[in-house]
Amino acid sequence: MTGFAEIWAYLADAPLLWLAATLAAYAAGETANRWAGRSPIVNPVLCAVAILGLALWVTGTPYSAYFEGAQFVHFMLGPATVCLAVPLFRNRALARRAILPILAALLAGSVTAMVSALAIARALGVDKTMLLSLAPKSATAPVAMGVAERLGGSPTLTAVLVIATGIAGAVMATPLLDAMGIRDWRARGFAVGVASHGIGTARAFEVHETAGAFAGLGMGLNALLTALLAPWIASMFL
């Protein structure tokens, strides 16, 4: 045990340890997802979060130490989000033909995501900080955290809520849309992007390229609309 502790102390100081652990955890989640026949329940991100959370708990590693090593993954979120414009550009003709339904769905989805969450939280008696942190939870993480901080909420809590929202959407979207009989890939993708941002968008790309393109569009537009509407909608529940 003494030898293991010495080895771990050496590895913990290596800057690439937690980057490698993050990539390995996601690879394990992706493998599990393939073995499960791409079942939405076995979500790679959910599996990776569970594996990393267990690893941090077992080793007693604080999150700040983990993030210091794995922050390169966080940095790559920006370029990865920009890359979503490529499939959208390929499907630009489909987007132009559906501009009015897109705008209507955006307004309905964005407002419903905020109002429903705040109404339920208010009914359960949560405090002001939680309400303000909850309002932007369906927007992509960088935007949601910025909005929460501006409103007076907790960006850290918002980040957790954003991840939980994304995973829930990625897990439930496909069976729910199938049950509702929605077959249009544009509608399916856009709904997932508005409701569950980047994690849902990644799931949409696994299902169909057109769905992924419209999910990216929904994610971007919802981030913009959430930043504009969240302060006004949150004020109604305070």
Image (spheres, rainbow, N blue to C red):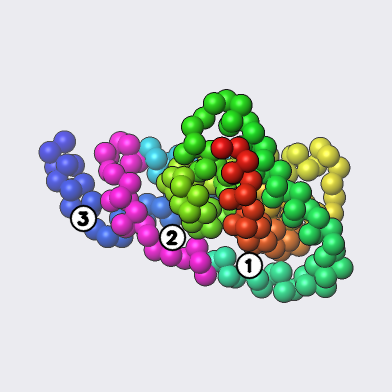
Distance (Cα) linking label 3 and label 2: 20 Å
**In the foreground, 25 or 86:** 86
**Label 3 secondary element:** loop
Name the residue at 82% across, 65% down: 99
- Residue at image point 57% right, 55% down: 140
- Name which of mark 2 and mark 1 comes first in the sequence: 2
Mark closer to the chain start, 3 or 2: 3
Position of the N terminus, as image quadrant, is top left
> Which label was assigned to residue 84?
1
In the image, 144 versus 91, the foreground residue is 144
Which residue is label 2 attached to?
A: 74
Q: Secondary structure at mark 1?
A: loop
User: Marks 1 and 2: in contact by CB < 8 Å?
Assistant: no
Q: Is residue 230 visible?
A: yes
Hey, what amino acid is under mark 3? Asp
170 over 140 or under it: above or below: above
> For this view, does 237 lie left or right of residue 9?
right
Question: Where residue 120 sits: x, y (%)?
Answer: 63, 31
For the residues bearing labels 1 and 3, Cβ distance under 8 angstroms: no
Q: Is residue 61 magenta?
A: yes
Depth check, mark 1 against mark 3: the one in front is 1
- Residue marked by disc 3: 13
Instruction: Say which label, 1 or 3, has the lower sequence index.
Output: 3
Q: Residues within 10 Å of mark 3 (few under 14, many from 20)?
A: few
Spatial separation of the CA atoms under disc 1 and disc 3: 35 Å
Spatial separation of the CA atoms under disc 2 and disc 1:
16 Å
| Quadrant in which the C terminus appears | top right
Magenta-colored span: 55-79
Mark 2 Cα within 10 Å, few/some/many (few <14, many 20+)?
A: few
Quarter of the image for residue 167 reads top right
Please check the rendered image and state whether residue 222 is part of the magenta-colored stretch, yes or no.
Answer: no
